[in-house]
Amino acid sequence: MRLAFFIAAVAAVQGAAGVALAAAAAHLDASPFLATASQFLMIHAAAGVGLAALARGTPRREASWLAAIALALQAGVTLFSADLAARVFLTAKLFPLAAPIGGGLTILSWCALAAWATFVMLGANSSGTPRES
């Protein structure tokens, strides 16, 4: 699935942005907004790489849903973090409700991932596929 490589590429950019914001928080402005944005980007960058790898080893139908969830997760955390960074560097919000929309999409994406994993697990168990330990 080629989309997995796109997810990994987005995650890599998020990781780089997270490190850059951490450096900015340490050297330019000790804002808690920058520290939070940095942490969110780096944590979700690792999650994005993991989801990309999982998508590569998942059957196509399930992988398509997983890719959509991963992209929504990446979009949410990027929007949330961009709004926090804009508050520091632009002294204004990215746009009204950007952070709550991004944060809400991030939360919903994590919930969707939990539901996806549960349904895939239950589907594998009901189809007679041997369970992995």
Image (cartoon, helix red, strand yellow):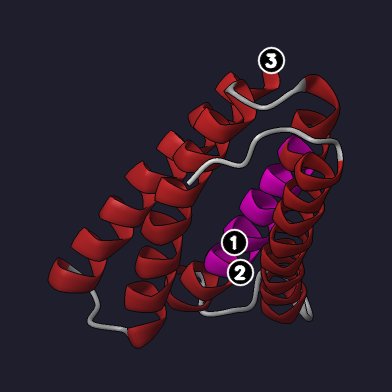
Closest to the camera, between mark 3 and mark 1, is 3
Q: Classify 53 as above or below 47.
A: above
Amino acid type of disc 2? Answer: Phe
Q: What kind of element bears circle 3?
A: loop
Amino acid type of disc 3? Answer: Met
Q: Name, please, the residue furthest toward the left.
A: 27
Dot 2, how many residues are within 10 Å of its Cα: few (below 14), some (14-19), or many (20+)? many
Residue ID at (62%, 50%): 74
The foreground one among 75 and 1 is 1
Q: Residue 56 location, x and y as percent?
A: 59, 22
Q: Residue 117 location, x and y as percent?
A: 70, 53
Q: Pointer 1 and pointer 2: residues touching (CB < 8 Å)?
A: yes
Q: Give the numbered dot on residue 1.
A: 3
Rounded to the nearest angstrom, the CA distance separating label 1 from label 2 is 5 Å
51 part of magenta stretch? no
Closest to the camera, between mark 3 and mark 2, is 3
Q: Pointer 3 and pointer 1: residues touching (CB < 8 Å)?
A: no
Residue ID at (74%, 76%): 104
Q: Pointer 3 and pointer 2: residues touching (CB < 8 Å)?
A: no
Rounded to the nearest angstrom, the CA distance separating label 3 from label 1 is 23 Å
Q: Classify 97 as above or below 47.
A: below
Q: Earlier in the sequence, mark 3 or mark 1?
A: 3
Q: Residue 65 location, x and y as percent?
A: 82, 39
Q: Give the numbered dot on residue 77.
A: 1
Residue ID at (66%, 55%): 73
Q: Classify 49 as above or below 88.
A: above
Q: Name, please, the residue furthest toward the bottom.
A: 32
Q: Give the numbered dot on residue 80.
A: 2
Q: What kind of element bears circle 1?
A: helix
71 part of magenta stretch? yes
Write the start and end of the magenta stretch as one range.
67-82
Q: Name, please, the residue furthest toward the top.
A: 2
